[in-house]
Image (cartoon, rainbow, N blue to C red):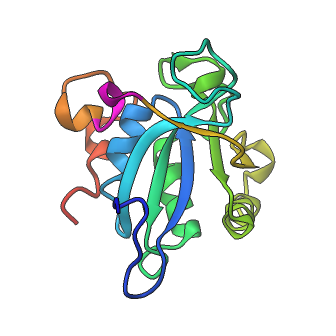
Amino acid sequence: MSDLQHSTKQGSLQTIYFAGGCLWGVQEFIKHLPGVVATEAGRANGTSSSTEASYDGYAECVKTCFDPAQVTVAELMGYFFEIIDPYSVNRQGQDVGLKYRTGVYSDDEQHLAAAQDYIGRREDALNIAVEVLPLNNYVKSDAEHQDRLSRFPNDYCHIPLDLLHKYKGR
């Protein structure tokens, strides 16, 4: 059983999906967060079941497996908001296009409610462009995109390096 599927002694691990521009940087940041057990680069809410199809409306995302005894969805949202421009539509840094939109996806209604609550409590809630939607399709990205910045640390990333590794080793 993979890290993305196993259970802990405290209970089952949970999975949520974060889209925040180019998935290379989002994965590199999220995988070092407290309570995150595993990550996987992928595509959320497109219509295809393959990465070989033409663009089908997906958002580049990071499948995030976490231990809810160590980190809450609200805390994950706080971390996520450190690396995104929450007001930007279909753009993060130099990455422009629908696939670079920001979003939070899950098949767990409680995750979606917690994400919406986090956004709703912010003073700037009315200006936030982060979509919060049920996950209706997920496709794992090709191997070349998995842990890309761990393997090729000098590749492009829209997240500043000091922020990218803020939680590494903690």
- Residue 71 position in % (x across, y down): 46, 73
Q: Residue at x 66, y 40 (%)?
A: 137
Is 52 placed above or below 5 here? Answer: above
What is the magenta range? 142-147
Q: Position of residue 65 (x, y in %)?
A: 45, 60
Residue 109 as seen in the image, left or right of residue 163: right
Picture layout, residue 77 above or below residue 49: below
- Horizontal side, residue 85 vs residue 150: left or right: right
Q: Residue 69: percent from the left, percent from the top?
A: 45, 82
Q: Depth check: 76 or 66 in front?
A: 66
Q: Is residue 146 magenta?
A: yes
User: Is residue 35 found inside the magenta-colored segment of the image?
Assistant: no
Q: Residue furthest top?
A: 54
Residue at the image point whose x is 46% and y is 44% from the top:
83
Q: Quadrant of residue 150?
A: top left
Depth check, front residue: 11 or 95: 11
Asked if residue 143 shows in the view, the reply is yes
The N terminus sits in image quarter:
bottom left
Residue under the image location 30 percent in, 25 percent down = 144
Tell me if residue 98 comes above or below residue 169 in the rendering. above
